[in-house]
Image (spheres, helix red, strand yellow):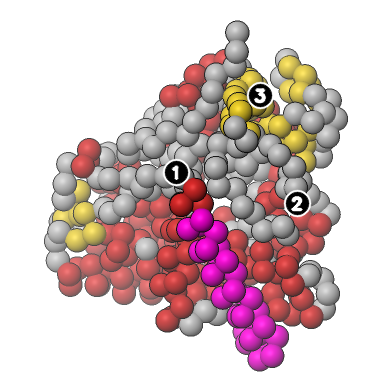
Amino acid sequence: MSPPEYGPPDLPGLDFDPFLAHALEQGPAMKILLPQGGELTECWLVTRYDEVRFVTSDTRFSRRITGRPFPTMNRHLIPMGASVSFIDPPDHTRIRSVVTPAFTEARMKALRPRVETLVAELLDGLEAAGPPTDLIEAVVAPLPLTLVGEIFGFAPADLPRIRSWAQGILVRPRDEADVARVRALRDEAAEFFSAVIEERRAAPREDLMTDVARAVDEERVSAEEALAMASLTALNGWHPVRNNLSNMVFALLRRPHLAEALRAGDLSVPLLVEELLRWIPHKNGIGQPRVAVEDVTVGEVTIRAGDFVYVQYWAANRDPDVFACPAEIDADRPGPNHLAFGHGPHYCVAPHLARVQAHVLLPALFARFPGLRLAVPAEEVAFQQDALIRGPVTLPVAW
């Protein structure tokens, strides 16, 4: 029997991908078919929690896949040659070390007062606008965009362009015209980030782009590596956070008992945020592949050298052998750790930045607006189509 073909669906709301639910039932690893060129090619999909952790941390599975054909769910996969997404340690570790000090837990704890001030200002603006108002445009989009601008040192006038690039690049194109559009946006963004790096080399400041420029001058990274790292981190510092904060609010508005418990102070905000991160299917599809560099046994199957392997973190977060009643949001769930930020060397570079925004925004929003509710029926909230990162287009609210 031929393996099933997988195509990432554009699902309504926060529905969980039924294909992934089926894959979970089949076991830790199963073969699927994905396009490669004009044909369908077999590869592996790993969905169970323990096996996902194993594959993503074992050096026998490599992310160095550029420069060779491979099966992919995306017609558009145009990584910069030096992108850390497609590099293994020790080079991966070396390049990431340029930006990771800016996003440590200690640095984000020090940033929290600024986040609190910014959230209060944005909620003032929301209240002044009056209902109904799009919560995303009023609060959720400007919050991470402003913080990315301040951390990296971008001029406020450049932030709309960074937002536009993130929205236009992190997508699944439908046709060749879309592919050409994404390539053009990527090149435009690269030109901007390169110019900023050169500006900081000539005139250093106290910001992350100066750290990146200094790393080039000190020959810790090449100019190409610096460009790829800076642009990837900046674009992902806004778009995924914008969507995940929106998803969290949407999930809470659809569960009034949780919203009320949050408003009353009856929930642990950190525990609630971690549970929402576990439960929300953050991305569409199955991400980026690895290739086995030698034969490896995963579960009860042998993955051969040269086989391509995809892992699915959102499926692993619903593994019933690890999480009791995984389809439910349990605000008091004590653990284990979810995989929403990934695992292994390619773990998200700035999870604490995403967390601090959720920790501040969610309780402040629901306390400030006790009657907060969706201004349209939940089924009328449109979610982005063709986006790699799932999230609503708008989130109309009233109070």
Q: Is residue 367 shown to the viewer in this render?
A: no
Query: Of the residues under marks 2 and 1, which one precedes in the sequence?
Result: 2
The amino acid on which the numbered mark 2 sits, given as a three-letter code, is Ile
Camera-side residue of 342 and 227: 227
Q: Nearer the viewer's eye, disc 2 or disc 1?
A: 1
Question: CA gap, disc 3 to disc 2?
Answer: 23 Å
What's the residue at 83%, 74% (across, down)? 219
Residue with the mark numbered 2: 87
Q: Is residue 181 magenta?
A: yes
Camera-side residue of 343 and 227: 227
Q: Which mark is residue 69?
A: none
Question: CA gap, disc 1 to disc 3?
Answer: 22 Å
Above or below residue 262? Residue 331 is above
Q: Is residue 160 magenta?
A: no
Above or below residue 321? Residue 179 is below
Residue 208 appears left or right of 11: right
Above or below residue 171? Residue 190 is below
The amino acid on which the numbered mark 3 sits, given as a three-letter code, is Glu
Magenta segment, which residues? 180-209
Residue 398: image x %, image y %? 16, 55
Q: Nearer the viewer's eye, disc 1 or disc 3?
A: 1
- Dot 3 crowding, Cα within 10 Å, few <14, some 14–19, many 20+: many
Residue 397 appears left or right of 337: left
Residue with the mark numbered 1: 174
Residue 23 appears left or right of 62: left
What's the residue at 44%, 72% (across, down)? 161
Residue with the mark numbered 3: 42
